[in-house]
Amino acid sequence: MNKIALLTIAVVSLALFVLPNTISMFIGQHTFEAGVQCQKCHAAEYAELYGAPTIDVHKRAANNANYTTFLSVGGIEYYPSNSTISTINSNKWVWDGTWDGGNGTWEHGSEHKLVSLDFNGNGEIEGAELCHLCHNASLFGIEGAHAVTVRVCDDDRCHGNRNHTYLGAATGLFANPSTTEYVVTAGYNISRENVHQSFYLNLSNQSSTYPAGHPYGILDPCGNARGHELSRGYWTCVGCHSEVETDVILNPHPVYNHSDTNATPQRYW
């Protein structure tokens, strides 16, 4: 076999190995493992996230394993009297603080869950761990794969919307429920007799580019869906809770020179 044939085989072999990963980078077929460093490909988004004024509160939410478990199982209510999470399909997840050596988990029959985004186990949410709060599919009811999804601000179990505010009945999962209540019901509140109402409802009637689907089964359509996509209602949140840096140069108009009595008459600016 001559050198050209060998070189051709080598190039084709390399293409078959590299091409799928190259294509996936540009058509969105990501995989989302716990240790992935999102900032390698999304440096601008990562910088914007960590420069946002809401970074600390979202870190605290991501570091609350009870809340992330609530997301993962599709909870609709939390009963503090018996430490039970109720889901849309009537499953009951009960807290058991004695299972697994006393660490505690949420249990449903023989299933045990305590979903943590603190992958390196240092007690903090840092680096790309925070990205998982809004983009890890397993927290969106999609099991068996590490695919990427998009969870927007007015998700049913984040800040709520005009149709669902599931976490509003589950503020006991947080350390300070009284200071959390208005945060998790924000979408519901601004959709009713609020100065932002018309803005929010108008955007809620428009579709975004993000698929909505039925993350926790056919019985649980997204409350912020518009057709088959999520609505643009979350733009209302982003409009007030994000920062945009701009460089502006103001060029003032020339003014009439009153000190020169012989100046040519002209209009004032």
Image (tube, grey):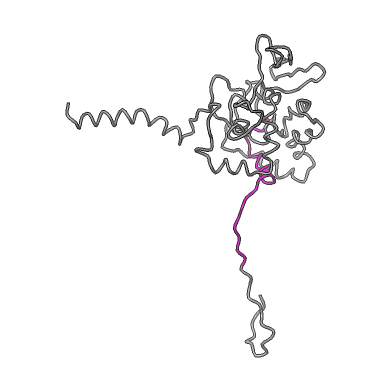
Give the percent coordinates (x, y) of residue 209: 56, 37
Please tell me which residue is depicted at 75% across the width and 37% down the height of the picture.
186
Q: Is residue 235 magenta?
A: yes
Residue stretch rendered in magenta on the structure? 223-250
* Viewer-proximal residue among 52 and 204: 52
How many numbered circles does the render carry?
0
Residue 90 appearing in the image: no
Please tell me which residue is depicted at 56% across the width and 41% down the height of the picture.
45
Give the percent coordinates (x, y) of residue 234: 66, 39
Q: Is residue 56 left or right of residue 32?
A: right
Give the percent coordinates (x, y) of residue 164: 72, 29
Q: Is residue 196 magenta?
A: no
* Viewer-proximal residue among 40 and 122: 122
Q: Residue 15, located in which quarter of the rendered image?
A: top left
* Viewer-proximal residue among 223 and 43: 43
Residue placed furthest toward the front: 122
Residue 88 appearing in the image: yes
